Amino acid sequence: MTIGKGDMTDWWQCVTIDAEMTLEIEPSLSERFPGLQAIKAHVDDVRVEKSSVEFQQFKEGICQEAKRKYTLDSLKDVSIFRCYRDFFWKVGIDPTKIRPAAEALVRRILAGKPIPLINNVVDSYNLASIKTEVALAAFNRDELKGNLLMRTAKRGELFSE
């Protein structure tokens, strides 16, 4: 499958929940943040490439929809964004300086700034974040080793690509 070409409504047909690799949440995180969830899925046969013209037209539709749905003043009252902001405060991040991802993307649209084009995969999950108001991330499964653990970073630990 190539994300960004063809019928965009059929993306889900290539998504499977990966039973081979587990994703666990560290017990201390679950205690600190009751209800914290992460969902993992595996998308097969993806080619990372420049986003197509069709995709850019699809993106424009999502951006127009966001402009109709939100205003800069109303964003603070969107319940999902409010939850993300509360979570950020709880973990020591000021969400007025570092915005939750989906909110930051919507703010860019409302401010008349373009959504950065990276590649068809990143661009697709950015649009999905805008549409659903939920933070998303993607990782190359071939680069992941072993089972996954969501945990608090250790002091001095650096995030690497």
Image (tube, grey):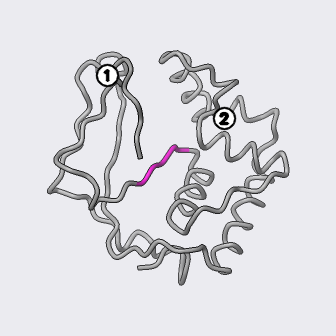
In this rendering, would 18 be left or right of 4? left
| Residue 17 position within the rendered picture, expressed as x and y whole percent measured from the top left | 26, 58
In this rendering, would 66 be left or right of 141? right
Residue at the disc numbered 1 = 29
Please state the extent of the stretch shown in magenta in the rendering: 134-138
The residue at the point 53 percent across, 44 percent down is: 134
Residue at the disc numbered 2 = 78
Question: In the rendered view, would you say 123 is above or below 134?
Answer: below
The residue at the point 68 percent across, 80 percent down is: 53
Kind of residue indicated by mark 2: Val
Instruction: Determine which quarter of the picture holds residue 111.
Output: top right
- Residue 90 versus residue 65: which sits nearer the camera? 90
Q: Quadrant of the N terminus?
A: bottom left
In this rendering, would 120 be left or right of 107? left
Inspect the magenta stretch and tell me whether residue 136 lies in it. Answer: yes
Inspect the magenta stretch and tell me whether residue 140 lies in it. Answer: no
Question: In the rendered view, would you say 40 is above or below 94?
Answer: below
- Please, what is the dominant secondary structure of the magenta stretch? loop
Q: Secondary structure at mark 2?
A: loop
- Residue 130 versus residue 146: which sits nearer the camera? 146
